[in-house]
């Protein structure tokens, strides 16, 4: 060869959009394309962007393979660069064309044409002669660096996982997936948004249940809208006063994913006090009898797809109707940093329905939700002081006895204390 390497630049068009949007499938196809051509893969580094697209590179001993996908255009831009003459980049090209189900146009460039560059007598001081630096191609483990990203146009939160997706179902409502993340264990994601991870789900699930439970005068009949992963009912059933929990989850795939993989959360699905309904929670409250529940918990996803209606006035008016005279409601309120408008609108919507003095906002740390700062909004049929109208000693004992990991009597009060910028947002 009269050059150091060969570089193929490819325009893959008319591709399968679902494949282009699947970081795991893309990473696997890229590794396979490299290996089929006889390359030694050293590492892979892939990111999935939400709402769409994947970028990544496979570093091979003989250079690299890189890809950027635009599922919405059914387009991928790919470059395949190999040095030496042991690896034929067109073999990788063929593999990818098949994997992406693509049409293509491509050009090949010679890189480092030897009639232009000349070898010098440069010898690095620390030449890599140490056998520890040689790649043992038989026992070598590829460093896979694949990232799940929950983001909007301005900010993102990424978690690394090993490239394998444990559960992946596209339902009529959403895409439900479970990943095994390196830092946070199993993670449930809906439509590319983090719902919960094994390592930090207790922050959310303890906080959506215990502050309202400790404030409740009566806690017998509870309605949970959403909550299909099971984390919320796990916390609820820690109260012996609870006689019945009705949980209405729209997507059975969430329940199935949890039953299969989320073992810290799926522990109460067979509790005899649970009525588990797979159905539309919005429709359910519309048809439910008035004054039925002491507590309504709205444990939904972010306001896209089926959860959109969980942020509407009509829905909360129905929730208020089904609450008993002293009943309470708690709903996840998004992030004042990441979803400022939704956060404020939901608060105003609840105040319109329950009254200005009967809606209270809590903040807590949600380490794997974008921005790390998350809110819960409480609405009550009776006026209360949420920071104080609970039995501190009982709350402290409960927290100890049940071995809670986040909630305690001090967190209770602190959660309702808001930073000035959040107060300003809510008063605006
Ligand atoms: N952006 C994440 C908001 C998710 C709220 N619900 C999580 C469900 C956990 N049971």
Image (cartoon, rainbow, N blue to C red):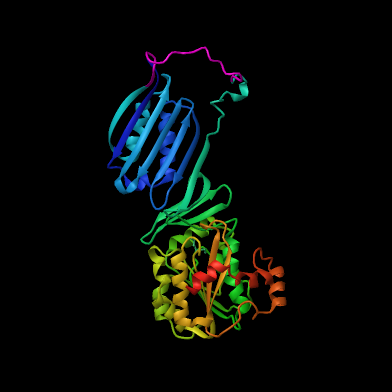
In the rendered image, is residue 269 in sight? no
Residue 52's place in the image compared with 133, above or below, is below
Q: Is residue 322 above or below residue 346?
A: below
Query: Magenta: predominant secondary structure element?
Result: loop
Instruction: Please give the count of numbered marks on the rendered protein.
Output: 0
**Residue 218: percent from the left, percent from the top?**
59, 83
Residue sticking out furthest to the bottom: 325
Asked if residue 118 shows in the view, the reply is: yes
User: Residue 195, image x and y in percent?
Assistant: 50, 59
- Determine the residue positioned at 64% across, 70% down: 414
Nearest the eye: 282 or 362:
362
Left or right: 59, with 130 as reference point: left
Answer with the quarter of the image where residue 23 lies.
Answer: top left
The structure residue drawn at horizontal position 59% and vertical position 24%, both measured from the top left corner, is 133
Quadrant assignment for the N terminus: top left
Could you tell me residue 421's position as x and y percent?
Answer: 54, 67
Residue 106 placement (x, y as % from top left):
29, 31
| In this rendering, position of residue 79 left or right of residue 210 | left
Which region is colored magenta? 111-127
Vertical order, 383 against 118 (above or below): below
Q: Quadrant of residue 208?
A: bottom right
Q: Is residue 381 magenta?
A: no
Asked whether 103 or 237 is in front, the reply is 103
């Amino acid at each position: 060869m009269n050059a150091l390497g060969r570089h193929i630049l490819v325009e893959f068009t008319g591709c399968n959009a679902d494949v282009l949007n699947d970081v795991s499938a893309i990473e696997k196809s890229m590794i396979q394309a490299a290996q089929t051509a006889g390359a030694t893969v050293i590492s892979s580094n892939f990111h999935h962007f939400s709402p769409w697209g994947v970028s990544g590179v496979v570093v091979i001993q003989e250079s690299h393979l890189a890809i950027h996908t635009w599922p919405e255009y059914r387009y991928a831009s790919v470059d395949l660069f190999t040095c030496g003459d042991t690896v034929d980049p067109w073999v990788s090209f063929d593999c990818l064309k098949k994997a992406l189900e693509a049409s293509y146009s491509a050009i090949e460039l010679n890189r480092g044409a030897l009639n232009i560059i000349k070898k010098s007598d440069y010898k690095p001081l620390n030449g890599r002669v140490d056998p520890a630096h040689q790649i043992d191609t038989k026992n070598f483990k590829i460093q896979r660096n694949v990232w799940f990203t929950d983001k909007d146009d301005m900010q993102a939160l990424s978690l690394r996982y090993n490239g394998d997706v444990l559960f992946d179902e596209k339902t009529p409502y959403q895409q439900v997936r479970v990943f095994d993340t390196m830092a946070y264990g199993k993670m449930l994601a809906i439509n590319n948004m983090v719902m919960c991870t094994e390592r930090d789900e207790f922050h959310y699930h303890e906080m959506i249940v215990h502050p309202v439970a400790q404030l409740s005068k009566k806690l017998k009949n509870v309605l949970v809208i959403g909550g299909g992963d099971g984390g919320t009912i796990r916390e609820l059933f820690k109260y012996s006063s609870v006689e019945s929990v009705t949980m209405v989850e729209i997507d059975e795939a969430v329940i199935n994913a949890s039953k299969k993989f989320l073992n810290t959360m799926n522990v109460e699905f067979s509790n005899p006090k649970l009525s588990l309904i797979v159905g539309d929670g919005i429709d359910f409250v519309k048809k439910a009898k008035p004054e039925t529940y002491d507590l309504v918990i709205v444990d939904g996803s972010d306001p896209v797809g089926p959860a959109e209606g969980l942020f509407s006035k009509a829905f909360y008016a129905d929730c208020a109707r089904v609450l008993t005279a002293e009943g309470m409601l708690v709903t996840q309120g998004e992030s004042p940093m990441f979803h400022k408008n939704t956060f404020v609108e939901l608060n105003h919507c609840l105040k319109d329905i329950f009254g200005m003095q009967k809606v209270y906002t809590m903040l807590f740390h949600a380490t794997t939700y974008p921005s790390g700062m998350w809110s819960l909004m409480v609405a009550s049929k009776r006026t209360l002081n949420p920071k104080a109208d609970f039995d501190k000693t009982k709350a402290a004992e409960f927290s100890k006895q049940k071995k809670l990991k986040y909630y305690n009597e001090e967190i209770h009060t602190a959660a309702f204390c808001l930073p000035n910028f959040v107060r300003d947002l809510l008063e605006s």
